[in-house]
Image: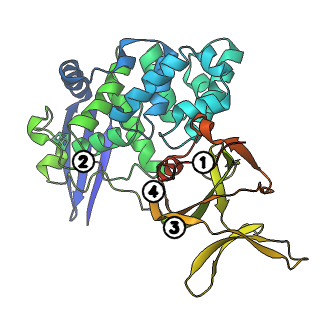
Amino acid sequence: MEMFRLFFCEKSAFALYFCSDMMIFTYLCVMSMDFATSLLIWYQRNARPLPWRETKDAYAIWLSEVILQQTRVEQGEGYWHRFMRLFPTVEALASATEDEVLRAWQGLGYYSRARNLHAAARQVVSQGAFPRTIEGLRSLRGVGEYTAAAIGSIAFGLPAAAVDGNVFRVLARYFGLASSPYTTQGRREFTTLATELLPSAEPGNFNQALMDFGAMVCTPQKPRCELCPFALTCVALREERMEELPVKRLKKKVTERRLTYIYIRNKGRVAMHRREEGDIWQGLWEPLLIEGQDKYKLQTVGREGVVAFVYSAPTDSPEEAVLAYPQLLVRNQRHELTHRILMADFYFTELQQPLALPDGYCWVDEGKIDEYALPRLIVKLLERLPAPCLQSP
Ligand code: SF4
């Protein structure tokens, strides 16, 4: 049986292979100082020119880290500029309303990041300044281990290794690490190694260098080994295991959810609702959603299969009334979230009489709908709307 174990001492990494009763000792590389130095030289020549790298302002750096948590740099850079323009300081962000922040974030997805950003800005302002320790940074809303290490090392030079998917990949491949970084034990092993490698004089540059290297050279698919300064000593390349490292996490089951929206226009107004806590898109706005609610429903009537928008009274009254025959604009619009696939149908109707709306809904001026923070799926659906044909009162 084959087994592989890594051991670290002050500046070196060693591997022991146990193979059919024989123990093979391999000196892996790798003076860590050499790895760090080579990486920093590579970074000096190849670093991506990003605006938040031209500053030591903790606010600007924090903003970039939060935006880039689930977003590619190409898309995130525009949002970073937008936030810096709208909220140039942490005080400006703290004094904005949640709607203003969500509106600026619109299109980036994972809206809890925006809400946490806003809440953390208020924490910073109430404390008087950005915390300058890893523990202090971790106490901010939405700031986890990785983000605290990134901000701390880049803005304040703290000796903290920021380990994320890019870093896992580079380290797993270069050192041939067989443990999964997605287990508690494996993550600890990767963090220990990254901390061993971290040069005390340039922790921020080292962390950013690893991020860039993982994004530009040691990429998830087709790593560019022919350009890699570590090609001679890389375990994965030598053993042709780039595909299998790092050891993947088990995939979570993806569930499907059906949403039926009905866009109700009434004299220049639209029935809208702000989503609440405990579900997707918290704090964002959407048209009337029919998803198991009982006051209104869509119902197929007649042999032709015409769909009616029906008022359905509570169970103690048998009353039921057709309010309109809405037009189907979009069927089965697919929208993917993490671990969830949404399938949405989108109907439109224009009512002449106002409607008693369900709890949580209100009428909003259709001309001002752009001022509301909307999920990207809803923005996509709204593009299919017909122009208003009734006069406003
Ligand atoms: S040689 Fe290839 S697999 Fe190894 S670190 Fe470089 S890019 Fe990654």
Q: Earlier in the sequence, mark 3 or mark 4?
A: 3
Residue 176: image tag? 2
Q: Is mark 4 within 8 Å of ligand 1?
A: no
Residue highlighted by disc 1:
281
Q: Do labels 2 and 3 touch, CB within 8 Å?
A: no
Label 3 sits on a secondary structure element that is: strand
Q: Residues within 10 Å of mark 4 (few under 14, many from 20)?
A: few
Disc marking residue 256: 3
Mark-to-mark CA distance, 3 and 1: 16 Å
Q: Looking at the rendering, which quadrant does residue 167 occupy?
A: top left
N-terminal of the pair, mark 1 or mark 2, is 2
User: Is residue 223 among the parts visible in the rendering?
Assistant: yes
> First in sequence: mark 2 or mark 4?
2
> Quick check: 70 left or right of 248?
right
Tell me the crowding category of disc 1: few under 14, some 14 to 19, or many 20 or more residues within 10 angstroms, Cα based: many
Residue 353 percent across, percent down from the top left: 76, 56
